[in-house]
């Protein structure tokens, strides 16, 4: 008997392939299709599964530049700043962080110059954001 829970097996399949059908997930997780549907519905309702996405190799996108931007935020303005950052179209994902910066954002723009403008004008223009440190993504390795 596996010590890995049904939920963990289903999530593992979804993490590997967010486009897998219920039948494929059921086969790979060794459960029935109705069980897969029940668990996925419950995980979506609980907010464990927050969306499905494609993984992009930034080097193959000739029309876009992508950066992970570490941001420092004034603690008194943290809630308002995160709300405003989440509304920016260029911010694809926003994470809290326990590392060097309070927030990490995946930011996309047409090219490096445009990305620089997004960082200097939009991100640093948000009340409470005190610093933004970009790392430009070059090539996806895994």
Image (cartoon, rainbow, N blue to C red):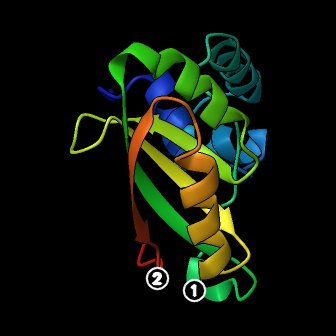
The residue that appears at 62% across and 79% down in the rendered structure is 113
Provide the secondary structure element on which disc 2 rests: loop
- In the picture, measured across the screen, residue 5 lies left or right of residue 107, that is left
Residue 49 occupies quadrant: top right
Q: Is residue 109 above or below residue 25?
A: below
Earlier-in-chain disc, 2 versus 1: 1
Residue 13 drawn at (x, y percent): 55, 45
Would you say 112 lies left or right of 131 here? right
Q: Quadrant of the C terminus?
A: bottom left
Label disc, if present, on residue 120 of the rendered structure: none
| Residue identifier under label 1 | 59
The relative height of residue 25 versus residue 117 in the rendered view (above or below) is: above
Mark identifier at residue 138? 2
For the residue pair 2 and 118, the one nearer the viewer reads as 118
* Quarter residue 141 falls in: bottom left
Count residues near mark 2 (Cα–Cα under 10 Å), then give few for <14, some for 14-19, many for 20+: few
Q: Are marks 2 and 1 in contact (CB under 8 Å)?
A: yes
In the rendered image of this protein, does residue 73 appear above or below residue 66? above
């Amino acid at each position: 008997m596996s010590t890995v829970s049904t939920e963990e097996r289903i999530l593992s399949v979804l993490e590997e392939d967010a486009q897998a059908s219920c039948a494929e997930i059921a086969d790979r997780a060794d459960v029935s299709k109705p069980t897969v549907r029940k668990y996925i519905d419950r995980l979506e309702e609980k907010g464990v599964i927050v969306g499905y996405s494609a993984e992009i190799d930034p080097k193959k996108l000739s029309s876009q530049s992508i950066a992970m931007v570490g941001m420092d935020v004034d603690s008194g303005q943290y809630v308002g700043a995160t709300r405003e950052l989440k509304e920016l179209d260029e911010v694809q994902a926003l994470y809290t962080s326990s590392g060097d910066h309070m927030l990490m954002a995946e930011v996309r723009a047409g090219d490096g110059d445009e990305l620089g403008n997004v960082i200097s004008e939009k991100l640093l223009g948000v009340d409470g954001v005190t610093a933004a440190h970009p790392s430009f993504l070059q090539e996806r390795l895994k």
